[in-house]
Structures are given as structure tokens and as C-alpha cells.
Amino acid sequence: MSRVLLRGAQVITMTPGRPDAEHAEVLVDGDRIADIGDTIEAPDAEVVDFSGRIVIPGLVNAHLHTWQTALRSAGADWTLMEYLTHLHGECVGHYTPADMHISNLAGALTQLDCGTTTVGDWCHNVLSPEHADAAVEGLVQAGVRAVFLHGTPYRAPNIPHPLAEIDRLLDGPVREHALLTLGMALQGPQYSSVETAVADFRAGAERGLVVSMHQSGGEPSPGWEAVRDAGLFSPLTNIVHGSDLPDEWLKTLVEAGVTFTTTPENELGQGHGTPVTGSLLRLDAAPSLGTDIDTAVPGKVLTAARIALAHQRSLDHARHRQATGMHAGTASVTAKQALAWATVEGAKALGLADRVGRIEVGMQADLVAVDARALNLWPAHDPVATALHADIANIEAVMVAGVWRKRDHALLTSRLDEVKDQLRESGERLLRSIGPAGPQG
């Protein structure tokens, strides 16, 4: 298998016990990181000089409805209720398998372009097995690492998750691909009957799958208590948003190992509620990050990290001034914490913490090189902050499982124009299904 030696960069490993950033060489052997050190002798390796660059773990977008890529910007001014009405009420049923495929392909390529190597693909518009297979194939063709979180359009509260389809995917389309993992995008206790919620959680636990659900709909329903009493909350449970969960419930869930994913730009813009970041930090926990919907916001997880950081600092500054009458002397949250939300915490939320999120011997070689020589980042006095401040133009190279997916600031794919044409055609046709109050009105 191929060996690649990355030389000359400042490396942010996100590994406990190592410096925040260090001048180090990284040896990739096949799909894994084989060595990290000051000087590595590997005469058989291809040497890549990354002087002036910052190498970070591949970013993790832990919550993305990739199937909406063709509808980019159509809902930029929608509230949450308008989004639910126009997209989920009017548009979802018009999706064909081809629409699912092109959105997932283009969306996954965009994530790679932005430095995201792992996507939590929350695919809750699986209208048929053909829709599922097409969505999976889009991810595979892009070459991204993904957890395909199988979901369906909103169902009656007493209809359980279609387990025959979960088992079909486990036995074939997902298991066949090394970069794909299966999970379940559940309606969850908030939107299911008590019996259905417990049954869905139990089905996920029996299969060892991550189960993820939305929660931004008010006080927890009785289903939450039933799932808790059945002992089904675990590190394989992922809650998206969580904005309205009371502190006592957050404490119970954190103690059970449950992970949380906040999508700060969309939550603040559409009206989900206050991001859960601060509540988790007060419990010595931390969120992972997602960008949620390209329909409303750009799919750049570094942007989500900066918004989450700035928003939480703003809340903490206001709290400090209210309590003391003075400005805070130090920042309440650091840039490194925010970068961890986009790497380490994302890997944990998707059940992949043993594979990605850190640069460490034995981990998957999912790496991103940030060109810190660019005018907008130079001089890079603080490598962690520089990486956090990077934009898509600064993402010079992206590697997934030892394979380059982006080099010299360009995606390594030859058919982008064809993908863009198909994406535009899909989006224009789908938007015609939205009523006169929507973007076509």
C-alpha cells in the first residue's frame, strides 16, 4: 500500500498530552497514520512538503441533511415553521432517487472542498429502498467518510422505524463500503408514541447503531422518561439541537454518555432556540457541530465553529457584566475548544472516536492541510486560531483514509461541470413543487 510522508507543517493533533501545535512529520501508510515525530525516516514514502501549512484532523460535520443540496439558499429567509411547511410539507414527496443521488454527491464533494472528511448524513427523506441506495451511492462516489443516518419523512407517532430496510442496508449497500457506517435518524421520543420510541431505541441498541434525533420542540414528552427507564440512553444516542431541554434532563443525558450536536447558524437564524453549548460546558461536556441544511445556511463547519464560539462568548460576557458590572478579564471559551467541537466531539457523536477526529498513530489518515501562507491568514501567530479562521480558499489539501481528495486547492474530480448541471436541474424542478409563498412566489 502507498506511503506518504508529510513534512514541514505545523501539526495540530488534538491528542491529549501533546502540544496545541507542533512542528512534526506525519507518516501515512495505506489508510492509517503510521508515525508522528520530529524526523521520520521513510525512504520508500512519497514526500509532500507542507512548509507554511497547518495540518489538522479532518473536520466532522455531525449533522447535515445532504439530500437538500440542490435547494441551496432557497430557504435563506425561512423561519423554522416556513421550512417545515415548504420543504417537508410540499417538496419532499417530489424527490426521485436521482435527486437524492445528485444532492448527496454534490453535497459530499462540497464538504470535502471545505475540509470536512466525515459527514453525519441525516437522510430523512428515504421514500423507498431505491432512494436510500441512490443517496448512499452519491456518498460513495464522492469519497467522503460518512455515517448514513437512515430516516423517513415524518410519520404518524405510532409507526416504528422500518427495520427491514435497516437490516437490508446493513447486509449490503452500506457494509460493502469501508468509509460508510449505518445509523438511524429517528423521530425520537419527542415525535413518537412512548411504545414506538422505546422500540426504535431498542432496535438501534440491538444492532449497535448510533441513533440520532431532533429535539427543539419544547419540554420533554413522556417518551423521554420511558426511554430513560428502559436504560436505552447511551453513548450511541445523539441529540440534535436540544435547545429546550431542562438542565436536569441535560445532566441525566450527559451522565448516560449521550452526545449533542448543535447547528448554531441555523438554530439562531430559524428560531430553534438558544444553542445548547453553554449548558453542556457547565456540565463538563461539549457539543459537536453540524451545518444542518444547505437550504438555509452554507455547509462550512468551520463557520459553524466560529459562530458557536462567538455566540457562547457573547452570552458569557453578558452574564459576567450582569453579575459584576465589569467586563470579563479572560475569554470563557477558547479557540481550541471550538476546533475540538468540529473534530474530536464530532467523531464521538457519530460513534467514530476510535477512528477519526485526532491525528494519532493507528487512527485513520483523515487529514486537512490549511495554507497559512495566504494573505487572509498570514502571519499565523496562533496555529489553532489560524486553522479555525480558515475559509474554503485556504483548504489546500484533503485526505480521506490515505487517499487525496483535494490537492493544490482543487478537488480531484473530473466531472464537476456535469455534477453542477445535474444539481441545478434537480433544484429547479423541485422548487416548482413549492407553493406561491415559497421562493418561486
Image (tube, rainbow, N blue to C red):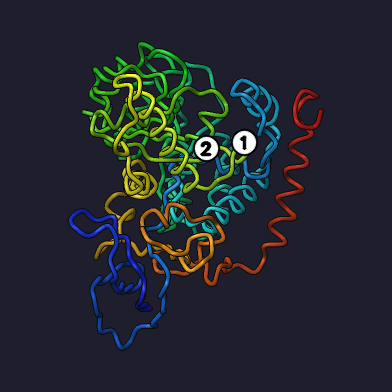
User: Which residue corresponds to mark 1?
Assistant: 296
User: Which residue corresponds to mark 2?
Assistant: 292
Cα distance between the residues tagged 2 and 1: 9 Å
Q: Determine the residue positioned at 70% across, 26% down.
A: 90
Q: Is residue 165 above or below residue 89?
A: below
- Residue 36, by quadrant, is bottom left
**Res 60 visible:** yes
Disc 1 element:
loop
- Residue 125 is situated, as x and y percent measured from the top left of the image, at 58, 35
Q: Is residue 218 above or below residue 435?
A: above
Q: Is residue 336 above or below residue 439?
A: below
- Residue 429 is situated, as x and y percent measured from the top left of the image, at 78, 40
Q: Classify the position of the N terminus by image quarter.
A: bottom left
Few, some or many residues within 10 Å of mark 2 (<14, 14–19, 20+): many
- Nearer-the-camera pick, 111 or 221: 111
Q: Amino acid at mark 1?
A: Ala
Q: Is residue 132 left or right of residue 243?
A: right
- Residue 315 is situated, as x and y percent measured from the top left of the image, at 39, 27
Q: Is residue 263 above or below residue 120?
A: above
